[in-house]
């Protein structure tokens, strides 16, 4: 049996291709993770799919911001919810807000369900308000209720499909446009982005 080895700068693409082709997966150079930090992703392989989650990291984030005992919510903030720059009182010390949003950014690697709201929250890093902090805490409560959510990869043909969308001058506060894209390998999402 042939062992296939590929090297790309995109680990999700590697995993998606390997699962799509039903290749044997073998972890090499495990010590590298311990030299440069700890592994934050958990990988679960079944006969039908491979799932990447970050439940340990998400639990650590909840603990770090004293949200582990908060009441979980079943939905992230609605995409139609508009966060605006000067809604609420400006935070005296925005350090905690910035840390929370930064931690949520890392979670978007395996949680595309929160990518939109985290992108919105990132826009207020320089002058966050109490409203932005409450929206961030809402996302953390959503994470608490969905700790085991992640990305699943299933075997499929190697068909590359991309979708994009934009809303021209859609932001009422500054008139800027937002564009987004998602790339699939078969049914597996391997890349996504949203930019203002």
Image (cartoon, grey):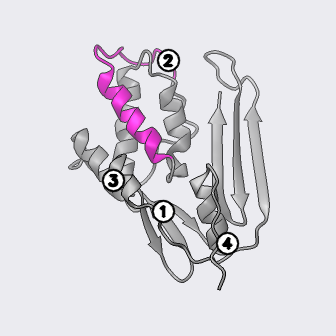
Q: Please report contact status of discs 4 and 2: CB closer than 8 Å, yes or no.
A: no
Q: Nearer the viewer, mark 3 or mark 2?
A: 3
Q: Nearer the viewer, mark 1 or mark 2?
A: 1
Q: Position of residue 121 (x, y in %)?
A: 48, 30
Query: Which badge, 4 or 2, is on the more N-terminal residue?
Result: 4
Q: Which residue is mark 2?
A: 85
Q: Secondary structure at mark 1?
A: strand
Query: Does 80 appear above or below 30?
Result: above
Say whether residue 72 is visible. Answer: no
Asked whether, in this view, residue 133 is left or right of residue 14, the answer is: left
Q: Position of residue 149 (x, y in %)?
A: 45, 60
> Is 1 inside the magenta-drawn segment?
no
Query: Which badge, 1 or 3, is on the more N-terminal residue?
Result: 3
Q: Secondary structure at mark 2?
A: loop
Q: Secondary structure at mark 4?
A: helix
Q: Please report contact status of discs 3 and 2: CB closer than 8 Å, yes or no.
A: no
Q: Nearer the viewer, mark 1 or mark 3?
A: 3
Alpha carbons under labels 1 and 2: distance apart: 34 Å
On-image quarter of the C terminus? top right
Q: Which residue is mark 1?
A: 52
Q: Position of residue 167 (x, y in %)?
A: 74, 32
Q: Which residue is mark 4?
A: 20
Q: Which residue is mark 3?
A: 34
Alpha carbons under labels 3 and 2: distance apart: 41 Å
Q: Magenta residues?
A: 84-108
Mark sitting on residue 69: none
Residue 55 lies in what quarter of the image? bottom left
């Amino acid at each position: 049996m042939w062992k296939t080895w590929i090297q790309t700068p995109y680990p999700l693409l590697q995993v998606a291709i390997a699962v799509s082709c039903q290749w044997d997966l073998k972890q090499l150079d495990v010590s590298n993770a311990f030299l440069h930090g700890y592994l934050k992703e958990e990988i679960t392989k079944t006969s039908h799919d491979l799932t990447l989650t970050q439940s340990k990291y998400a639990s650590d984030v909840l603990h770090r911001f004293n949200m582990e005992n908060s009441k979980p919510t079943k939905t992230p903030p609605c995409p139609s919810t508009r966060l605006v720059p000067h809604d609420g009182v400006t935070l005296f010390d925005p350090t905690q807000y910035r840390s929370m949003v930064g931690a949520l950014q890392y979670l978007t690697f395996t949680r595309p369900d929160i990518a939109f709201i985290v992108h919105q929250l990132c826009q207020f890093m320089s002058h966050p308000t109490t409203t932005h902090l409450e929206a961030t805490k809402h996302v953390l409560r959503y994470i608490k209720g969905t700790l085991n959510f992640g990305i699943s990869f299933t075997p499929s043909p190697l068909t590359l499909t991309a979708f994009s969308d934009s809303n021209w001058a859609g932001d009422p506060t500054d008139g800027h446009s937002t564009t987004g894209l998602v790339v699939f390998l078969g049914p597996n999402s391997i890349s996504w982005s949203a930019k203002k």
